[in-house]
Image: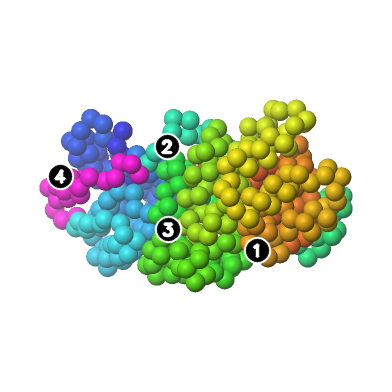
Amino acid sequence: MRFVLLLEDNPERVERFRTAVRSLGSDWDIREWRDSTKMIAECEDYFHEAALISLDHDLTPQLKDDPDPGTGLRVANFLAGYFPICPVIIHSSNTDASWSMHNELRFANWRVERVAPIGDDWIPQIWLPTAQNLLSVPTDSTMVRRPSDHSSRMERALLSLEGLAIGDALGEMLSYRFEDAQRRIAEGRLVGGPWFHTDDTEMALSIVEVLRLYGFINQDALARRFSWRYQRDPDRGYGSMTRKQLYALQTGADWRATAATAFGGQGSMGNGGAMRAAPVGAYFADDFGRAAGESKDSCAVTHTHPEGVAGAIAVAVAAAAAWQSRDTPRTGRSRDFFDAVLSHTPVSKVREQIEKAAALPEALSLQDAARVLGNGSLVTAQDTVPFALWCAARNLDSYANALSTAIAGGGDCDTNAAIVGGIVSLATGRESIPADWQNARERFPFDVRD
Ligand SMILES: [Mg+2]
């Protein structure tokens, strides 16, 4: 099915649009909204089948007491946060507003035409030929590659995201009293929600959105979501190099250039690619090789240094391994987990340190492990990922213990706990995440709909 997504408040016009769309062929259908808020909340679910979007600007409430339907400009703003999906027609008689919508979308590289609703037959006579003309330019059909089991993959990605977000928020809150974190968590002495999450979750949200829409890591789309989220909400604790890159993306730079030129052309070896990689591993949990490849792509949008990339791969494969181990009895579980990670992580300092983590004696204290492996205080991938995997491997049966171990190790507490949470939640399942933690975390955009 190919869909025209329509924002239009006049029922008579909707009928005429229907007739026009039917004339395009039997596999065409229309999905209409009369309210911008509702359209923004629901239209993403149709993006993967959308061939054309047509937007009115001025909207009036159907009944006197209906909520304010907003305007088409709100929808244009919303769409501009995405990499272009299909062409757009703006069919509004409000000329100034049409131009605002046009500019908003044009600057975000969408293909846009304006149509003035003049006369009685403008839909078949002006709108339809404009639509046919826009549709005659082929759109890249390789853009959306959702596999047939997309929804079960998304369930896993959302579970990992939830584990990651709670780890991130809790790690951030307890980072200044990390020595006391285990006791506080055990005794339930935590502040009430909502728990503010940081850049780790913001970037992971963008990853999950891209997977949700495309079924793979579309790097252009991911770069757009990263910079859109940053522009909307910059104070999430982003590192200074990431801020610079995201700012450059907003001003029109290509991610290929900004990622490669970071750190004097070496690319970043920070832990930013790893901190958001677990949901990628969750989505591709049935295939370690694919998890590794897609996480590499998700990392390369901002981090191109081989250490940064190795860190992201290790975390994604660890997430996939955690999910695969969910029904495995305890013995040997941690060994299998490390084996999977090591067999897919490229030769690097990250890998060397993971090997060391896998071989540490069972009785070694947390502080000693952090001393040997690092704890993220250098914010590099090699100083962060091995320790996080060590915390995860020892606690694949308990989400709460995994987080409290990660946080008590000090260092980059929010990122350590985000990585560990994104991995271990896949082994333990949602039911093992304390209900009051789930309620306390900040809401996601998906929560509204699902
Ligand atoms: Mg952070």
Q: Is residue 294 visible?
A: yes
Give the spatial CA distance, label 3 vs label 2.
Answer: 19 Å
In the rendered image, which residue does mark 2 sit on? 146
Q: Residue 308: percent from the left, percent from the top?
A: 57, 57
**Label 1 vs 3, first from the N-terminus:** 3
Question: In the figure, 168 relative to 397: above or below?
Answer: below
Please tell me whether mark 3 sits on a helix, a strand or a loop.
Answer: helix
Query: Dot 3 corresponds to which residue?
Result: 224
The residue labelled by disc 4 is 124
Q: What residue sits 52% from the left and 70% below the top?
A: 263
Q: Position of residue 357 (x, y in %)?
A: 73, 48
Image location of residue 62, percent across then percent down: 38, 49
Asked whether the residues under the numbered discs 2 and 1 touch, taking CB atoms below 8 Å apart as contact, a structural biologist would say no
Asked if residue 276 shows in the view, the reply is no
Q: Can you tell me whether the CB of the residue at mark 2 lies under 8 Å from the nearest atom of ligand 1?
A: no
Q: Which residues are magenta?
A: 117-143
Mark 2 vs mark 1: give the one in front. 1
Name the amino acid type tagged 3. Arg
